[in-house]
């Protein structure tokens, strides 16, 4: 993948706040690094310089799907054009990302409200070649959590991510040639389109909406951190019912919007799915595009993963039994259950349907079944799950934290992944689980409805077990269905094979962006 190459143009120094220094750092595509031509885009697409901006990347700094997207999409986009796009990803300089990073010869300061905050830019290359540009500020990002501790969110998150967004724009101003596109993701970087528009900068902006439930809503007093003129804190800008709403401002200011599935796109345009922003999104419906998420086969691969107890494939699934045994041993759960090994993985949040699952735990575990839950988030849910573990020792395991390879071990060892989400924009975890023969039992909503198909035993089709009513009784019926189905080895083997043969290539997302970006820049 072509890189955004940093050339040392001057000694390290400090640039006055908000002042653009064209020679402070120069970025250019390197012809020597270009990959062979790809058929992803049309012959006339050409190469572009794209700067992604996000708050997460897997596996080092991630709480869920956003991090997974940033771990795969930049590489896919970089490979997409005939000559290759030059793509870099701007991220906060979290401690986990700063390991192995090298300082670039660019630094500056930003006035954020009443404080003057220093910025030092570092560079890091991921194993797949993706180039990261890290905005380092120890006071704001040198913390153990991305957004908070295990008991509370950080009270200065507005300042932290407003600062980050402003730093990304200043970094883009110092790029030569300048990026044609700044692609922001979720509320943490949603201020970027407004900053670009206010300064009349020559960048086109794209804002991806991964989960509309998280909007970056803060007290109106935090608007001072933006250093924007007051007209931005009005109903036509960031103001929303007396508060500052970063996502709402980004939706109005961005040149284009994307979301992660066609079903979710339809849902967020309705009062039921728009989380209060449906009327704002309706204004921008013509600019709201679908860019589907994918699963990187080189990372989610049961045949070649080095972290599994044994490899296995759809054609030769015997190794999954060893992975099942190893998972139960690792978590000190009773071995060799006759029933199903269930799993659930995701943020501890109301969205994920824990309120539906928790009342069912005694019934679910009363038979010879096991359940492994991995997730962190809301302290009350964490306490409830810890309490449930004490009530069901050696049958239920809860992990509020885990190492980077644990999701693969979990999916390889579990039979069924529970996905009782009330809503789900995409649902990357079930797509990843499919690659390891872990069958989703899922509420048919959003991206889950788009990417999963209900298993039909007679026809031998389908890769999941879906239910449609959003309540505990429907979830329980689906769980019972899974238990009964897995008693039939031939039928469950066919379902598992279907799951493992499911593919969700990132090429689709790259193709969609290859079509969108040139339309914004006038190069189509």
Image (tube, rainbow, N blue to C red):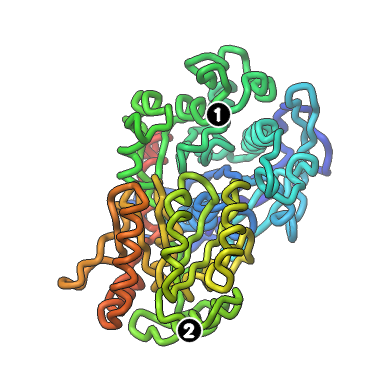
Query: Disc 2 on helix, strand or loop?
Result: loop
Name the residue beneath numbered marker 1: 246
Front residue of 154/132: it is: 154
Real-space Cα distance between discs 2 and 1?
50 Å
Is 292 or 205 nearer to us in this picture?
A: 292
Residue positioned 80% across, 28% down in the render: 116
Where's residue 183, x and y in %?
51, 40
Q: Residue 332: x, y in percent?
A: 61, 76
Q: Is residue 37 visible?
A: no
Q: Residues within 10 Å of mark 1 (few under 14, many from 20)?
A: many
Q: Is residue 199 left or right of residue 235?
A: right
Disc nearest the viewer among 2 and 1: 2
Task: Give the labeled residue for mark 2.
Answer: 336
Circles 2, 1 touching at the beta carbon (< 8 Å): no
In this picture, residue 162 sits left or right of residue 250: right
Secondary structure beneath label 1:
helix
């Amino acid at each position: 993948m072509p890189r955004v190459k940093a050339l040392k143009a001057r000694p390290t120094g400090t640039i006055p706040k908000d002042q653009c220094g064209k020679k402070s750092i120069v970025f250019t595509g390197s012809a020597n690094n270009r990959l062979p031509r790809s058929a992803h885009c049309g012959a006339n697409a050409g190469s572009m310089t794209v700067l992604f901006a996000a708050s997460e990347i897997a596996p080092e700094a991630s709480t869920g799907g956003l991090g997974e997207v940033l771990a795969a999409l930049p590489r896919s986009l970089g490979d997409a054009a005939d000559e290759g796009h030059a793509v870099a990803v701007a991220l906060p300089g979290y401690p986990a990302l700063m390991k192995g990073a090298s300082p670039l010869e660019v630094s500056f300061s930003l006035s954020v409200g009443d404080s003057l905050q220093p910025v030092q830019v570092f560079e890091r290359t991921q194993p797949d070649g993706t180039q990261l540009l890290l905005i380092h500020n120890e006071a704001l990002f040198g913390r153990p959590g991305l957004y908070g501790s295990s008991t509370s969110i950080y009270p200065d998150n507005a300042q932290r991510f407003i600062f980050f967004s402003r730093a990304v724009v200043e970094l883009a101003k110092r790029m030569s040639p300048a990026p044609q596109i700044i692609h922001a993701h979720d509320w943490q970087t949603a201020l970027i389109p407004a900053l670009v528009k206010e300064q009349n900068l020559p960048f086109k902006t794209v804002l991806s909406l991964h989960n509309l439930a998280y909007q970056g809503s803060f007290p109106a007093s935090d608007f001072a951190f933006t250093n924007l003129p007051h007209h931005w804190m009005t109903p036509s800008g960031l103001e929303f019912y007396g508060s500052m709403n970063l996502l709402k401002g980004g939706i109005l200011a961005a040149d284009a919007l994307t979301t992660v599935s066609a079903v979710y796109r339809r849902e967020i345009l309705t009062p039921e799915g728009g989380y209060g922003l449906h009327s704002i999104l309706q204004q921008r419906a013509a600019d709201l595009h679908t860019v589907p998420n994918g699963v990187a086969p080189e990372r989610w691969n049961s045949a070649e993963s080095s972290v599994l107890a044994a490899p296995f494939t759809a054609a030769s699934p015997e190794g999954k039994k060893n992975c099942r045994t190893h998972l139960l041993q690792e978590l000190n759960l009773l071995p060799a259950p006759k029933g199903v090994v269930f799993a659930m993985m995701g943020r501890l949040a109301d969205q994920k349907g824990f309120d539906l699952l928790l009342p069912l735990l005694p019934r679910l575990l009363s038979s010879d079944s096991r359940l492994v839950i991995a997730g962190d988030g809301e302290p009350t849910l964490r306490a409830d799950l810890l309490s449930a573990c004490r009530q069901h020792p050696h049958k239920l395991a809860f992990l509020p934290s885990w190492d980077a390879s644990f999701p693969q071990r979990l999916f390889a060892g579990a039979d069924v992944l529970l996905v009782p989400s009330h809503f789900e924009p995409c649902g990357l975890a079930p797509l990843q689980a499919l690659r390891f023969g872990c069958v989703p039992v899922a509420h048919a909503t959003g991206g889950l409805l788009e990417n999963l198909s209900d298993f039909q035993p007679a026809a031998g089709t389908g890769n999941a077990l879906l239910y449609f009513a959003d309540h505990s009784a429907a979830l329980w019926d689906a769980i019972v269905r899974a238990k009964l189905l897995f008693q039939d080895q031939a039928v469950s083997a066919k379902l598992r094979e279907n799951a493992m043969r499911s593919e969700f290539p990132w090429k689709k997302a790259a193709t969609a962006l290859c079509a969108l970006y040139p339309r914004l820049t006038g190069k189509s």
